[in-house]
Image: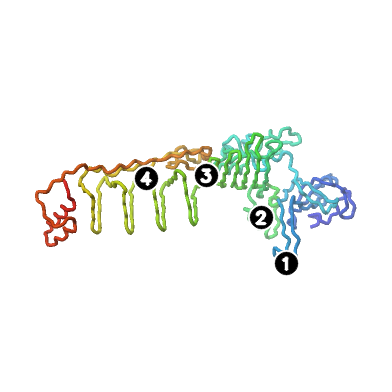
Amino acid sequence: MSETYGQSRKGGDKSFNSADTRGVKEERGVVIGKVKVNSHPTSMGVLQVFVPGFGDNANNREEVISQWRSVRFATPFYSRTDALGRGSDETTVKSTGGMVYPCPDIGSTVLCLFPEGKNQEGVWFACVPDRYMMQSLPEASMTSNFDKTGAAGNMDAMVRHDKAPGLEFNDQENDVTKLTNFKKPKRGVNVTRSKQLKTQGIDQDEIRGLSTSNVMRETPSEVFGITTKGRRTDINGQDIANRKDILDKLENGTDLSTSDARAVEGRIARKQGHALVMDDGDIEGNNNLMRFRTAGGHQILLHDTEDLIYIGNSKGTSWVQMDANGQLDIFSKTSINLRSKSMNFHADSTMKFHAGKQIQMVSGGSLHLEGKSMANLYSDGQSFVYGGSGTHIKSGSSLNMSGSGTVGIKAGGKMDLQASCIALNGATGGASKQNSIPAQGKNDVKQDSKGFWVKNGGALQTTVDRAPTHEPFDAHQTVTQETVFTTVKVSDVPDSGELKVKQPKLTIPVSNVGLKAAREFENQTQVLRDTVQFNQLFKPIVI
């Protein structure tokens, strides 16, 4: 253990000019160390570093374990209370708070400090970036200078825009010590981010998808951000979490192959990490925003330049946008579900609903539908009205009923008709047919042969004014104008005019009028009763 972590070393080999006594002052100040080991049994961020300035680096001494120094993690902020006594509850043990971040990967350079020159009390407190290797920090920003031959020669299926999310350039192919323009070398394409943006349909969207927020966009930089290191991968780019064989060996304490060990140490490669960006914008004021984007592609965007808030998931199957005009757009590929004890919906002007198949509204108590100027029920099929304990139809003015075919009225009991005048076969024009609300063809989107989401003009038939689609939604920058549909006006029942009543040639004397009088003649013949009922019910009639 001492050979691995150097805890018992006095200061390195003979080339390191120190006394034999541990803790001797060397007055070295702040030095740069190269990370050789970033794991430690204490799990407190202790690193093993090689400091080139400590001793002779001849004969490849960087790989000699005895030349490495142990340095503890010094966080920018840490706080703790004193333990109040024995026990294990929150009122007795130390309460800690502060900032933590992962250890840098092996090969990174860190700033180290040895307080009072004590070799065994070294700490690391900052990291030193490699030269020009910050073009994708805090997130993979867009560039037009990308390698179009990458992604296994299938770049046209990955990128259709003239810009793409870029990686760092390869400093093994470009000597950074001789580089005069860091923007000249072509950068690789962040394939993971490109796939995400393609799936989401925002691969050409330079507001919601692509970003310019990187620290090397300009100088001085106005970008503040934090990026995590990302998941460790093996030599084939597979997440270690999906390598059950490696996990089993780690669990059982079995030795790993060199390649797998390097993958566990994070020395092979990493997937992209999570990014938090706070960008005050470039010199022209563009991209003044805050964005939180996960490694998987979920994002929350607060964009001051565009004056909008945008939230979207990694698959593009749902998104929400709030803009400065007060428009709230919500898209869901499957369903939007709400539940509450009570819900209130209010629209100062119009409220529109459109369903491709069915609208169902059920009330466990009462259901009240009201239209102040008109209530219109229209169906190209059948319409039904049912009341289990009664049905009432009342009009404050005229009441029209008509049928293009047979009209049937059936009563299980008696049927009463009452009017100041009943005109059979009169001059009524029947009920007016209402207009259906016309559907509009709005732009939808679909995937093309390469999997990119493209506009599908007029494919969405709807009766509403605005219908968000899967990205790219072409109406993000449009303020929707409200339309109002007016149904056909129903006219009053036509008047039958002046009725000229003639007395029948043969009148049947009755002692009273109406059904009640007719029913009193119980000993009359059926013909007589029928004649009386007809004469009294429909009097006067035109002869």
Residue type of the residue flagged with mark 2: Ile
Q: Earlier in the sequence, mark 1 or mark 2?
A: 1
Residue 440: image location, x then y, percent:
42, 39
Q: Residue at x 48, y 51 (%)?
A: 344
Work out how far the residue at label 1 is from the one at label 2, CA to CA, in angstroms.
39 Å
Q: Which residue is mark 2?
A: 246
Q: Cα distance, mark 1 to mark 4?
A: 75 Å
Residue 190 lies in what quarter of the image? Answer: top right
Classed neighbour count for the residue bearing mark 4: other residues with Cα under 10 Å, few (<14), some (14–19), many (≥20): few
The answer for how far apart the CA atoms under marks 4 and 3 are is: 29 Å
Give the percent coordinates (x, y) of residue 47. Answer: 76, 52
Callout 4: SS: loop
Left/right placement of residue 293 relative to residue 347 reads right
Q: What label sits on residue 374 in the rendered view?
A: 4
What amino acid is found at the position of numbered circle 1 in the picture?
Answer: Gly
Above or below 135: residue 413: below
Q: Which residue is mark 3?
A: 328
Whether residue 236 is visible here, answered yes or no, is no
Query: Element at badge 1?
Result: loop
Q: Earlier in the sequence, mark 4 or mark 3?
A: 3
Per the image, the residue denoted by label 1 is 87
- The local secondary structure at tag 3 comes to strand
For discs 2 and 4, the disc positioned in front in the rendered view: 4
The image shows residue 227 at horizontal and vertical percentages of 67, 46
Q: Earlier in the sequence, mark 2 or mark 4?
A: 2
